[in-house]
Image (cartoon, rainbow, N blue to C red):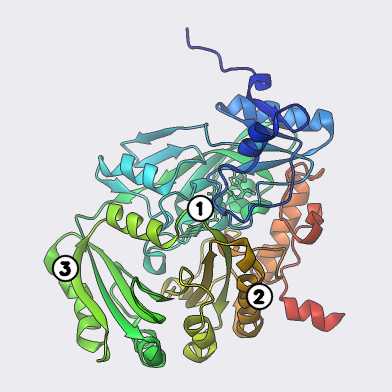
Amino acid sequence: MADSPPTLDSLIVWRSDANTEAYEKARVDRVFNQRRPKRFPIAVVEAIHESHVVDAVRLAIERNCRVSVRSGGHSWAAWSVRDDAILIDLGKLQEISLDEKTGIVKVSPSTTGRMLNGFLSEKGLMFAGGHCPDVGVGGFLLQGGMGWNCKNWGWACENVVAIDVVTGDGRLLHCDANQNSELLWAARGAGPGFPAIVTRFYIQTRRCYSHMRSSAYTYQKSEYHKAMNWILGITAEYDDDTEIVVVGSYPPGSPDICITVLLVTFKNSEEEARKALQEAEDSHPPGTVNKWFCNPTSLKQEYEDQAAANPSGYRYCADNAYISNDADVAETLQAAFTTLPHRKSFTLWYSMAPVSRRKLPDMALSMQTDHYFALYTIWEDEKDDERCQNWVRDIMKDVETRSEGAYLGDSDFQTRRTRFWGEEEGKKLMRLRRDWDPLARICGYLDVGDKSGLNGLENVHEWQVVAKI
Ligand SMILES: Cc1cc2nc3c(=O)[nH]c(=O)nc-3n(C[C@H](O)[C@H](O)[C@H](O)COP(=O)(O)OP(=O)(O)OC[C@H]3O[C@@H](n4cnc5c(N)ncnc54)[C@H](O)[C@@H]3O)c2cc1C
């Protein structure tokens, strides 16, 4: 006979009972950002079985409090940590299994991209998940998921074929195209306002590639316009299996900021990879301070590079925007790329075309342009908090006027209002939230003072709101 799961009581850390160390560990140990929130749940449940999620929601109903959810703990703004809520931490709820016939993998939300691809690679498959190895699929997929080669292969959430959820009134439901399909619609782009708790994702995988290769072209920041305008000119028509990114950063040992154009291609032979990368090699402007062409790489290697660029144990502040297709992109982003406030910080432009020109499937995710831009401000010392956060605020104040909106995944609703969905999709999402969680049991979007509750987000630009006042 299978062992029955431990009782909920044995998995709860109550703020009122636990010693400070145990409570703090449960509250924030699994939060990636060291800029710890001053918010305090009444309890943390470390669920190891789906039934614990149901029990935790029922407990919240009894206590008349909210629940918050943590999967991988990588939300920049630590959305899982909420005042007076029961935090359901899914870190110990672990499941991965593959249906070899369909290529659909069932995973628990705290599974990381690295864990999932480690499992799939042995079977010749991959999932185009987040670039950083330790992001949980839970938060990542709910926001849409800008995964590997998103510009061509599309949003990671497009591969979610079903989910299992626990609703705000404690029901366990399966959701797919035929049953509870509204929740599947919302799960593909609602982000932290999803009106239920996902306990399992069913994801369509793709075959893996035997020859991953990369090329890079690094320029001094004085060559920023030259480098940026070059890549902007070739990106939309570029090879289908190649992702393209421009990074502004301080490379190791460099006294100044440099601009690096990086191309990563997913192919099945060296010849195909060379062919894909040749166009950039032939057309890149002269004057590189460093470059490589068609170097072998792998998901493992790329994960290591990403982990090094986003080290754990640091303080972070991220923000982002989809720059309008008709904007002068290089001009709009110049200050962001050339004035970083800290050596560890970096700025990124990520090509989204041609996917951005394609009609998206019917799902909550509905905001995109050809140009994704994000700031990842990283520092170690609390004394730099204000300076680094002000830099982000000042850059975004200017950039947002030439943007269509932003991506939930790199946003903080406490610092800036903007548009996250198309007009109709935003309205539908807020209606579904009211229908599926009418008592706002699940915490939802963390805005200033955590007040948004059932209303959700306005889905308007900051300056539109400010102009009305
Ligand atoms: C270093 C780093 C690299 C990143 N790289 C990428 C990238 O390449 N592409 C990209 O798209 N994003 C990226 N992100 C953003 C990332 O996808 C989001 O921060 C995402 O929220 C992280 O998911 P998580 O499960 O780890 O986070 P968590 O903090 O655990 O979850 C965030 C919130 O999502 C909701 N949520 C999570 N799980 C569930 C669930 N099971 N049921 C209901 N609601 C849930 C909750 O509101 C929760 O508070 C990156 C973030 C970091 C820190």
Lower sequence index among marks 1 and 3: 3
Residue 166 visible, this orientation:
no
| Residue found at x 43% / y 63% | 154
Q: Residue placed at 43% from the left, 71% from the top?
A: 355
> Marks 2 and 3, how far apart in space?
45 Å
The image quarter containing residue 319 is: bottom right
The amino acid type found where label 1 is placed reads: Gly
Residue 397 relative to residue 199: left or right: right
Ligand 1 within 8 Å of the CB at mark 2: no
Disc with the residue nearer the chain's start (1 vs 2): 1
**Disc 2, disc 3: CB below 8 Å?**
no
Does 348 sit above or below residue 139? Answer: below
- Label 1: which secondary element: loop
Q: CA distance from mark 1 to mark 3?
A: 39 Å
Q: Which residue is mark 2?
A: 390
Q: Earlier in the sequence, mark 2 or mark 3?
A: 3
Secondary structure of residue under mark 3? helix
Residue occupied by mark 3: 272
